[in-house]
């Protein structure tokens, strides 16, 4: 169904954002360690500093694939579910224009309210509305 498809895409985007956060923490920690080692071992300092620009490039690619990472200040399951809902809403709005007209939908895809059905039956009886 449309909901499941949109949810899967939203979950994929949220996982990309989470991967960016994890990689940035790991790369920052590793870079600090490498910089400390290069300070204490000046003879190989150049080789120890070499991976840092590579880390920055990888983080840039991860950032672009995740379409930006606004820092929300909250982490954990609540943050992930909130991000999934945001991504689902974005994808739903994008896909809304791609949906077929209401008249072309199959009967299984059309939702009706009980009150609406009663009103339609009442209106179809040619009663006076005034």
Image (cartoon, rainbow, N blue to C red):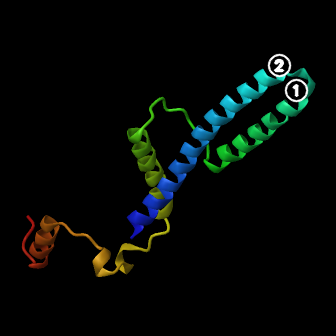
User: Taking 16 as reference, is 29 above or below it?
Assistant: above
Residue at the spot 85% in from the left edge and 35% down from the top edge: 50
User: Taking 128 as reference, is 33 above or below it?
Assistant: above
Please give left or right for residue 68 compared with residue 50 in the image.
left
Residue at the spot 58% in from the left edge and 45% down from the top edge: 19
Mark carried by residue 14: none
Q: Position of residue 39 (x, y in %)?
A: 83, 19
Residue at the spot 73% in from the left edge and 44% down from the top edge: 58
Residue at the spot 38% in from the left edge and 39% down from the top edge: 78
**In the displayed image of the protein, which residue is found farthest to the top?**
40
Q: Position of residue 127 (x, y in %)?
A: 7, 74
Closer to us: 2 or 71: 71
Closer to us: 74 or 44: 44
The picture quadrant where one finds residue 44 is top right
**Quadrant location of the N terminus?**
bottom left
Closer to us: 78 or 121: 78
The picture quadrant where one finds residue 112 is bottom left
Q: Are marks 2 and 1 in contact (CB under 8 Å)?
A: yes
Q: Position of residue 122 (x, y in %)?
A: 9, 73
Q: How many marks?
A: 2
Please give left or right for residue 32 compared with residue 79 in the image.
right
Would you name the residue on which mark 1 appears? 45
Disc 2 on helix, strand or loop? helix
Would you name the residue on which mark 2 appears? 39
For disc 2, the neighbor class at 10 Å (few under 14, some 14 to 19, many from 20) is: few
Which mark sits nearer the N-terminus, 2 or 1? 2
For disc 1, the neighbor class at 10 Å (few under 14, some 14 to 19, many from 20) is: some
Q: CA distance from mark 2 to mark 1?
A: 7 Å
């Amino acid at each position: 169904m449309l909901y499941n498809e949109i949810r899967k895409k939203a979950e994929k985007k949220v996982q990309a954002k989470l991967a960016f956060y994890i990689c940035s923490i790991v790369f920052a920690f590793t870079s600090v360690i490498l910089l400390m080692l290069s300070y204490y071992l000046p003879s190989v300092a150049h080789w120890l500093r070499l991976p840092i620009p590579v880390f920055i490039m990888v983080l840039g690619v991860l950032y672009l694939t995740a379409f930006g990472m606004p820092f929300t200040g909250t982490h954990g399951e609540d943050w992930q579910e909130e991000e999934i809902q945001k991504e689902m809403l974005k994808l739903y709005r994008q896909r809304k224009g791609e949906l077929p007209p209401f008249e072309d939908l199959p009967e299984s895809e059309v939702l009706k309210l009980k009150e609406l059905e009663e009103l339609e039956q009442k209106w179809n009886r040619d009663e006076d509305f005034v």
